[in-house]
Amino acid sequence: MPRFRPVVPHFSDRQAQFQSFTERGEPQHSAARAKTLRKVLKSLKLDGLLVPRADVFQGEYIPASENRLGWITGFTGSAGFAILMADGLPLFVDGRYTVQAKAEVNGKLVTVVPLAETSPDAWLKREAQGKRIGYDPNLFTARGLARFERAAKDAGITLVPTAEDPFAAIWDNRPAAPASRVIDHPETFAGESREAKIARLQETLREQKLGALLVSECPSVNWLFNIRAGDVPHLPILRAFALVPAEGKPSLFVDPARLEPALAKALTGICDIVTPQAEGATEAEARLVALAKAGTRIRLDEESAPVRFSEAIRAAGGAPDLGPDPISLMKARKNATEIAGSRAAHLRDGAAMVRFLAWLDREIAKGMPLTEIDAAVALEGFRRETNALVDVSFPSISAAGPNAALPHYRVTEATNRPITPGLYLIDSGGQYRDGTTDITRTVEVKRSTKTMREAFTRVLRGMIAVARATFPKATSGAQLDALARLPLWEAGMDFDHGTGHGVGSFLSVHEGPQRLSKLGHTSLEPGMILSDEPGYYREGAFGIRIENLIVVEPRAISGGERPMFGFETLTFCPIDRRLIVKSMLSRAERDWINAYHAETRAKLASLVEGEARTWLEDATRPL
């Protein structure tokens, strides 16, 4: 691993950044676009249209060419839902975006509706009785559509699937669909050949008496075939479907011209390459219909398969088997190569974080004016200097003061705040060929209050409780979630997000089915990587979150009667000692933080130099 130069880089070249801080909503065009779309709906004899923020793959991230919600409303957030009616356009957003949405949209046209007050299906049931409401069957799963079907039944509403995308003919200058180069993800990173993965999957299909699996979750497609691409910002994937029979060759729906020559040759030997039009839904549907007519039992992923596929199978006389994609668990259990790669990526990333935090402390001490964007740009720069960064794993949550009280805050030029005395929170990560990282640190800026330090210590105690946990086989994330909350509950405090999410291997930073959450009912198994990130948020004042990534491992217990598991910590970076109230820690908690800092110092000292190494040594002193 290369040694880092003790140089403070200049981060003025914004064009080189993986992340942008300029929002590109166009609310000035919303009225004209809504008027045009309403004409299309009238020609289709529809009174309204459901507009989710989704594409045919139902992914968390979508390309600009698929952001119909943003195009019609001007809203730039990552989650939302609209219903276009002849006399209204409500936009439903959760608590992360109520303020942002109101600031971005044309208030004369768009009505922002907090999801906490009204859901889209409840609004539809109340406001659209007896109407004909259209929906694009590419943009809904069967489960997602079901709630609207229930509302429609109760209110005499007719839901009408659109045969074509209503936006297609009216969206001028629509961004081109992604067509990034598809590259091999070799066994040196994957740890298992694509042939072996396909054979394991097909064995599972036969065990479950399934004739075929339609793979619609893009990370699963990329994992199965050991490929990566850049079709979505920060997510190194090819957007594609695959069809895997229980016997015989799978089909991968991708333009062969996008494949690296050596990769094209390798894939041709193990699967049929089907050149698709657009995203490949038409070609996939044709094959599903043929299988359905032959009586094949076809599994569709209930989380990501568009409803058009299940409807097509039924129309062909088949019965779609809606259930979990078996690849999700296979992908979640990282093999030894992937875990080793994650360890290496985290050391590289930890060294970049140390250089950043040392730089931040120096700049603050010198009285240099810094903003949230300045800090986010600097951190990306330190990661870039590793010469291994492929992308950031998500837009950095760089949050000062009250902005940190918004758990999913994203800094923009419109919201950018100076970093002033108090607390500063940075939640960020990197995409490296050998692993995906995600880390949060909350640091003191010049001074903090007793309230801040006590809340920080409670959050730290919760994070330590999860990291130290030993638990029996078949334990779920829901059973461990309370460990992170107990220190906060003791003071009548809590946080409103899950304690942790699954993380992929040079894939999505948010991966299921594993998670530490009240809703996390999947059993934790060795090799699963998760985040451990409790927090505390005081609205309008400050926010705190501390996050490490951890991996489930077997844990031998002398004299134990059952198989037991625990966690190995992957993330190594100092936790701000200045914010820890030592008297609030138990002996075991103090021993853990001292041991963690000693290991952090031992692992990272040789990877940093000069002032950064001096800072590291001071930041990891025993409590």
Image (cartoon, rainbow, N blue to C red):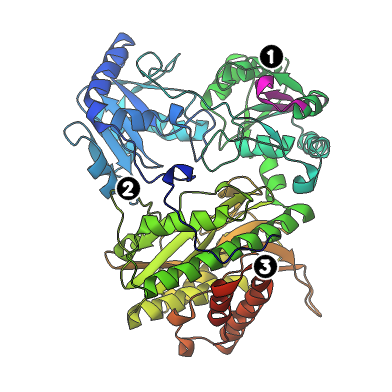
Looking at this view, is 352 or 235 the one in front? 352
Residue 252: say if magenta: yes
Which residue appears at 38% of the width and 13% of the height? 169
Mark carried by residue 567:
3
Task: Please give the residue where the numbered disc 1 appears in the rendered image.
Answer: 290
Which residue appears at 31% of the width and 28% of the height? 72
Mark 3 residue element: strand
Please state the horizontal and vertical placement of residue 394, each as a whole percent of the image: 50, 49
- Range of the magenta residues? 243-261
Is the residue marked by circle 2 packed among few (<14), some (14-19), or many (20+) residues within 10 Å? many
On screen, 90 above or below 354?
Answer: above
Quadrant in which the C terminus is drawn: bottom right
Looking at this view, is 57 or 478 the one in front? 57
Please state the horizontal and vertical placement of residue 28, each as a whole percent of the image: 23, 30
Mark carried by residue 97:
2
Mark 2 residue element: loop
Is the residue marked by circle 3 packed among few (<14), some (14-19), or many (20+) residues within 10 Å? many
On screen, 383 above or below 147?
Answer: below
Does residue 88 appear in the picture of this structure?
yes
Residue 295: say if magenta: no
Q: What type is the residue that disc 3 sits on?
A: Phe
Please state the horizontal and vertical placement of residue 27, each as a whole percent of the image: 25, 32
On screen, 47 above or below 369?
Answer: above
Mark 1 residue element: helix
Q: Residue furthest top?
A: 43
Q: Is residue 549 left or right of residue 184?
A: left
Q: Earlier in the sequence, mark 3 or mark 2?
A: 2
Quadrant in which the N terminus is drawn: bottom right
Nearer the camera: disc 2 or disc 1? 2
